[in-house]
Amino acid sequence: MKKKPTHSDVEPLEEKIATQETQNGVSQETKGISKETQNSVSQKTPEQEVTRIADLQRMNIDQLVVFAKAMNLPNLATMTKSQIVFEVVKAKSESPNEVLVAEGVLEILPDGFGFLRSVNYNYLPSAEDIYVSPAQIRRFDLKKGDTIYGTIRPPKDKEKYFALLRIDQINFEPPNLAKERISFVNLTPLFPDERLCMETSDEKNYTARVLDLIAPIGKGQRSLIVAPPRTGKTMIMQNMANSIAVNNPEVKLMVLLIDERPEEVTDMERIIKGEVISSTFDEPPERHVQIAEMCIEKARRLVEYGHDVVILLDSLTRLARAYNTVQPHSGKILTGGVDANALHKPKRFFGAARNIEDGGSLTIVATALVDTGSRMDEVIFEEFKGTGNNELVLDRRLADRRIWPAFDCIKSGTRKEELLYHPDELEKIYRLRPAIADLSPLDAMNLLIGKLKKSKNNIEFLLSLKL
């Protein structure tokens, strides 16, 4: 069992280091960094070389072993990937011309100090986590979930971890802006009024086109995908993620997979152009909860800075199950074995989705499992039904007939959809809805897809309607 780090493990940085002036500059190679802060990394001289820990963490194990062998590091066969990265960085730190830079998401421990966790390890503790002193946390008003980029130093005598020497960026912005931000709970929520268009240049992408017509998703939407088993919910989420990446590249996209199969995690990582955070079904519930909380805290911090964030969660039901397992029992048990207090934190997670007045938004699209045969899953779904402002209902009968997407067009919809459509578009949508309202889900989807196949895009389809 891994020993919990204490102050004795890591010598705190001197107050003068924590309070020294920060440099506003990072490398051009760092994704998502503003141009104002791309001129220099730690005032690097031409003789110095920069080593980014994140680049090493992104390597697969074969590439990393080859890299480490070139540095003549011993005993690689007995090390984990995390340990190899640690030894590589430690070896590089011995060179006087080496500048070490790291980035990660801050997790603050009860003792007052914190560590930068890497997304490459799903925000779980690792050997090369970066220590952040209490003095730095106080000076910059750092919070759990802050994305930090800065220069680090190697561990000194009796220290176990690399330590943050200077902060160059907080949430992709200059560090001095941290004191000016407004706390997430004090931001004013509004109905979504800017659409995340799912339709792409691929006219055969019927999932995205149908989604835009029957249940549009806006920035700040709280969307629930009601999904029986084997109805294609994973494919729908992959489609949505890729559409968002193409049509809204400014959006910070995170895909959170809880209690999923390992092969589906790999598939998602290879298909999606975004951040994939996962905890597979063989992990304990405590890890499910920790990863989910790190993910939502990171999203909250980015929204405080005015960023638009999208979280695709698969699935909300399994997250609620994990919270039910780790929650101390209150003595009040609901039907299906759900503790009366267990659903508060999952609701807090889902309820964080909102459109913020004066900029920024957090969109959460989560799947809720139904028809699984579990009474607990039914209770969890009933608790969350009605909490969202967008609902996508999948129909098993369509999936059994291999009709994709398996949307129930009649039951699916968005609250205040008039804020997301152009007035001319809205008029056509209002005429389309009654035309399919009396049909069965199977007939409605067949009719809709048949019409979409005759048009190149949704605008052409709506203009062709004679209702």
Image (cartoon, rainbow, N blue to C red):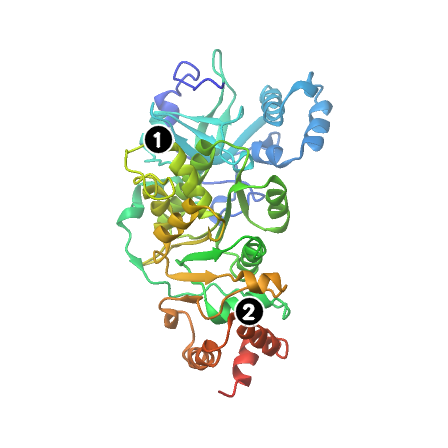
Q: Where is residue 391 in the image (x, y as percent from the top left)?
A: 42, 61
Helix, strand or loop at disc 2? helix
Asked whether the viewer can see residue 284, the reply is yes
Establish if 68 lies above or below 102: above
Residue 137: numbered disc: 1
Residue 273: numbered disc: none
Q: What residue type is labelled 1?
A: Ile
Q: Mark 2 points at which residue?
A: 209
Left or right: where does residue 60 sit relative to residue 446?
Answer: right
Crowd class of label 2 (few under 14; some 14 to 19; many from 20; radius 10 Å): many
Q: What residue type is labelled 2?
A: Arg
Foreground of the two, 89 or 311: 311
Left or right: where does residue 25 sit relative to residue 176?
Answer: right
Q: In the current view of this chain or complex, which residue is farthest to the left?
A: 186
Which of labels 2 and 1 is toward the front? Answer: 2
Instruction: Tell me the residue at 43%/37% (across/down).
Output: 322
Q: State the separation of the CA atoms marked 2 and 1.
A: 46 Å
Q: Where is residue 143 in the image (x, y as percent from the top left)?
A: 35, 36
Helix, strand or loop at disc 1? helix
